[in-house]
Amino acid sequence: MTPARLTTSTNRFRMALATALAAPLALAACNGEETIEGGTSGEPIAAIAAPEGTSWNETFTLSEDGMGFIVGNPDAPLKLVEYASHTCGACANFSVTGKQPLKDDYIASGVVSFEQREVFLNANDVVIAALTQCGPGERMQALSDEVWSNLPVVFQGIQSNPQAMQAAGQLDISERFVRMGEVTGLIDFFAARGLSSDQARACLADSDKIDAMVKASSAKAEEVGVTGTPTFTLNGGKVEAISWGQLEPILQRAGAR
């Protein structure tokens, strides 16, 4: 599974947001970022117990910049971040094959925390991100995983009516993403997973919030130097991994074992 690549500029993305074009979007890569190829070498880190009556797998904390929710020990010595697109096949593969062992073997121990951050390859990513963030914050990652585990169904809806999607792109911004959610079936998809249609429409109509989400997420990904999805960072340094099979040894060499 190859990563999805970003091919245009952040400014073009912002123009695409204004016109709701479904063209590929991308972020300019930054130079000078440290890359962790084989993982840092360190002694095994002892497990850190969660507060009595709680589990790290059920602990969610808003990130310091307010851009996402962290699952696990917020003070974990190993902080893993994934920059991901909801329409990225390699991201879906990681979600399906890696999320459960990551939670069971590393987050549950209190040694690793995990945060997911948005990357936008197209306007459909914007709609999906707005919907995953529409409900309670602790549901965000679970809803994202629902999208990735059902990606063929999601794609079928996205590709089912290109004429209607093109027409949606001509609507006023306050109506545009609502219509896209209707045409693609995404509002119904999320309604079946606990997000009411009325709530979904309200979130998709909030163009100011969507614009702020896009600008903040795109700026952060650009700062990190994201050039494809998924991109992982461990304690701030990019790692050479796009799959669980590549990522787990890096975590282990960093002490999560």
Image: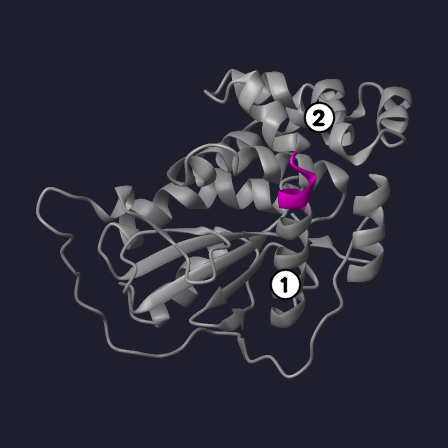
Which stretch did the figure color magenta?
Answer: 206-210
Q: Can you tell which quarter of the image residue 7 is in?
A: bottom right
Which quadrant of the rendered structure holds the C terminus?
A: bottom left
| Residue in the foreground of this view, choosing between 123 and 65 | 65
Magenta residue check for 168: no
For residue 216, above or below residue 210: below
Disc 2 marks which amino acid? Val
Residue ID for mark 1: 221
Specify whether 102 is left or right of 15. left
Residue at the (61%, 16%) spot, across then down: 188
Residue ID for mark 2: 178
For residue 161, above or below residue 45: above
For residue 145, above or below residue 16: above
The percent position of residue 10, horizontal first and vertical second, equals: 77, 60
Residue at the (69%, 25%) spot, across then down: 181
Magenta residue check for 209: yes
Q: Badge 2 local density, few (<14 within 10 Å), some, or many (20+)?
A: many
Q: Can you tell which quarter of the image residue 55 is in?
A: top left
Q: Can you tell which mark lies on residue 11?
A: none
Which residue of the protein is positioned furthest toward the bottom in this rendering?
Answer: 32
The percent position of residue 37, horizontal first and vertical second, equals: 53, 74
Disc 1 marks which amino acid? Ala
| Residue in the foreground of this view, choosing between 82 and 12 | 12
Callout 1 secondary element:
helix
Tell which circle, 2 or 1, labels the residue nearer the N-terminal end.
2
The percent position of residue 73, horizontal first and vertical second, equals: 27, 57
Total marks shown come to 2
